[in-house]
Amino acid sequence: MSSRKLLEQNGICPVATTIDLLSSKWKVLIMRDLLKGTRRYSELRTSVAGISQKMLTQSLREMTDDGLVIRKAFPVIPPKVEYHLSELGESMRPIINSMADWGSDYLDHHPEKRRVTMQPTPAQ
Amino acid sequence: MSSRKLLEQNGICPVATTIDLLSSKWKVLIMRDLLKGTRRYSELRTSVAGISQKMLTQSLREMTDDGLVIRKAFPVIPPKVEYHLSELGESMRPIINSMADWGSDYLDHHPEKRRVTMQPTPAQ
DNA sequence: CGGGATCCGCGTCGATACTG
DNA sequence: CAGTATCGACGCGGATCCCG
């Protein structure tokens, strides 16, 4: 079933609406990094560990189309493209923060699952 | 790439940890409904519109294994099974609430996408 | 009623090659 | 550097049938 169809069947539920725009784990992780500031394509390629170039491009494209992300291309050689959150994207910060908070608490109470610590998305 | 592998490559990031347990849209929608209280299998089948029986069973199973959901089966005929959130599951309320809040605001500013209003997850 | 088991189509995703 | 294009595998998830 398509995401839109799902949304309709759930009667335009706010939660379903959010899921519709933040559907994949990749987008959440991209959000996590863009909440720290502007990032170049190649930077995201590294910081969002494990993502393929195809999924990064595709995810950024969809997020740009959805108005969450703003793409800024510089006409230089070699090419340089920067991505940053729009105001709409920025407004998702509480969601990502609540995920970071929950994950931190969870890892605190399940030490066996923690190996390396990473900086959570800073509050703002 | 497996979800665990992803987690490792992201250095046990809190956000990635949360995503690992709340990976699918179905689980988020199930959480949304279980946050309102105990539900029977058949009730979820209806309230989580569009979900197939397979995905509902599978999602509930994984959430139970992850310690988010508690399954209570009554030895009666016909069978009766109730699901409710564990303390760990309950602790995810802020995440779902922040999604509901964001979705509500988004729908307010994009009236063309709203058709039917549904009750958001109540604060608690 | 609340599943389990099976089949299988189709979309997702990674890998690879190529380009402005 | 930041993509685009193509191909192929694989697993998600729906459909169906069955059972305690």
Image: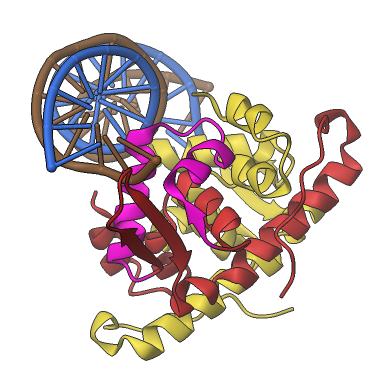
Chain colours: A yellow, B red, C brown, D blue
Q: Nearer the viewer, residue B35 or A89?
A: B35
Pick the quarter of the image with the C terminus of chain A.
bottom right
What is the chief secondary structure element of the magenta stretch? helix
Q: Quadrant of residue C19?
A: top left
Residue A22 locus on image (x, y percent)? 59, 47
Residue A118 locus on image (x, y percent)? 42, 80
Q: Quadrant of residue A112?
A: bottom left
Q: Is B57 contained in the magenta span?
A: yes
User: For the image shown, how many numbered marks are present on the structure?
Assistant: 0
Residue A24 locus on image (x, y percent)? 48, 45
Q: Nearer the viewer, residue B71 or A62?
A: B71
Q: Can residue A106 be seen from the camera position used here? A: yes
> Above or below — where is B55 with respect to A119?
above
Q: Can residue A74 be seen from the camera position used here? A: no
Q: Residue shown at 83%/33% (left/top)?
A: B114
From the viewer's perspective, is B5 left or right of A2?
left
Residue A39 locus on image (x, y percent)? 59, 58
From the viewer's perspective, is B76 left or right of A33?
left
Q: Residue shown at 27%/68% (left/top)?
A: B8
Part of the protein shown in magenta: B38-67
